Image (cartoon, rainbow, N blue to C red):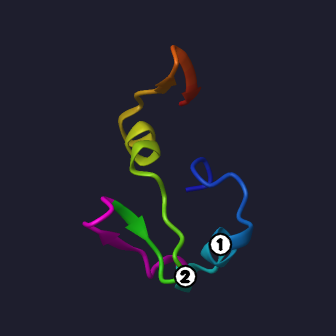
């Protein structure tokens, strides 16, 4: 997750606590992982990291 979340600040700060991090759930309504404090990760970003496929916006590689 350190590659996905580059700065553990704000809503992501509690994820540094292993006990809080383990509270992750899959929210099928939004199609991604979420934590009790409302933190979530964009499903496109998760897919990009899991598949190794880049995210391209306007012909430009923006992730991975």
Residue span colored magenta? 21-31
Query: Which residue was labeled with disc 2?
Result: 37
The verdict on residue 30 being magenta is: yes
**Residue 28 position in % (x across, y down):** 25, 66
Q: Residue at x 49, y 65 (%)?
A: 40
**Residue 53 position in % (x across, y down):** 40, 28
Dots 1, 2 in contact, CB < 8 A: yes
Badge 2: how crowded within 10 Å, few (<14), some, or many (20+)? Answer: few
**Separation (CA) of disc 1 from disc 2:** 7 Å
The verdict on residue 61 being magenta is: no
**Residue 32 position in % (x across, y down):** 36, 60
Q: Earlier in the sequence, mark 1 or mark 2?
A: 1
The correct choice, above or below, for 61 with respect to 31 in the image is above
| Image mark count | 2
> Disc number at residue 62?
none
Badge 1: how crowded within 10 Å, few (<14), some, or many (20+)? Answer: few
Query: Which residue was labeled with disc 1?
Result: 11
């Amino acid at each position: 997750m350190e590659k996905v979340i580059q700065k553990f600040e704000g809503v992501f700060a509690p994820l540094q606590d292993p006990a809080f991090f383990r509270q992750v759930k899959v929210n099928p309504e939004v199609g991604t992982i979420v934590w009790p404090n409302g933190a979530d990760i964009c499903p496109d970003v998760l897919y990009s990291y899991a598949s190794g496929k880049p995210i391209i916006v306007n012909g430009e590689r923006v992730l991975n």
